[in-house]
Image (tube, rainbow, N blue to C red):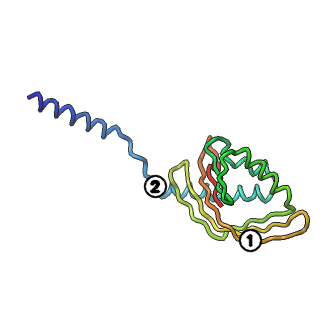
Amino acid sequence: MKKTICFVLIFAAILVFACNNQKEKVLTNEEKSTVENEISVATLNLFKAFESLDANKAYSFILQNEDFAEASMGKLITDHRAILDTMKLHLGSFQKERISITNQKIYVINMDAAVISLASTGEITFKNGAEIKAPFALTILWVKKDGEWKVAHYHN
C-alpha cells in the first residue's frame, strides 16, 4: 500500500511538473516574417549609419554591455568601447562609403533574437582620393533590448 501511495505521489508530481514546464513557444510564420522584416530594416539602417560616416550613429546599433563580441581579422573583440574607437578611426579616413547587400539569409531564433548572414559589396573612397571596391560577407546576431534591435555579435 505504501509503495502504491508513493508511486501515485511521484507520478502526480511528475505530471504537475510536466504540465507546468513551459515549452519554448514555436513562432508562427507571421511572427517569423515580422522578425525577418525588422532585421532587414535594422541591417539596412546599420549600413546607412556606416555610410553616413558618423561613428557615434553606427555605434548606437551596438549592444553596449559585456554580452557584445566582434570577430574580425583573426581577433575577438569583447569590449564594446573599443569598437567605437575602431569605428572612429576607420570612418574618419573615409570620404565616402557605399554598401550594397547582394544576398542575405535570416534565421529567426525567437521574437527577440535573430541571425542574419549576408554577402555584400563595399565601395570606399578615402580622403586621399584612393578608391576600393570589394566583396565581403558577415554574420550578425541581433537581439532586441528595450524594444530596439542591437548587434550582440558581429563576424566578418
Distance Cα–Cα, label 2 vs label 1? 38 Å
Q: What residue is drawn where x is 91% and y is 65%?
A: 128
Which residue bears the numbered disc 1? Answer: 134
Q: Indicate the secondary structure of the residue bearing disc 2.
A: loop
Q: Amino acid at mark 1?
A: Ala
Q: Is residue 33 above or below residue 17?
A: below
Callout 2: few (<14), some (14-19), or many (20+) C-alpha neighbours within 10 Å? Answer: few
Which residue bears the numbered disc 2? Answer: 28
Q: Amino acid at mark 2?
A: Thr
Give whichever of discs 2 and 1 has the lower sequence position.
Answer: 2
Q: What residue is drawn where x is 46% and y is 55%?
A: 28
Q: Nearer the viewer, residue 134 or 109?
A: 134
Q: What residue is drawn where x is 57% and y is 58%?
A: 36
Question: Position of 39 compared to 84: left or right?
Answer: left
Q: Nearer the viewer, residue 100 or 4?
A: 4
Q: What residue is drawn where x is 38% and y is 41%?
A: 22
The percent coordinates of residue 20 (x first, y second) are 34, 37
The percent coordinates of residue 45 (x first, y second) are 71, 56
Residue 17: name its quadrant: top left
Question: Position of 121 compared to 1: left or right?
Answer: right
Mark in front: 2 vs 1: 1
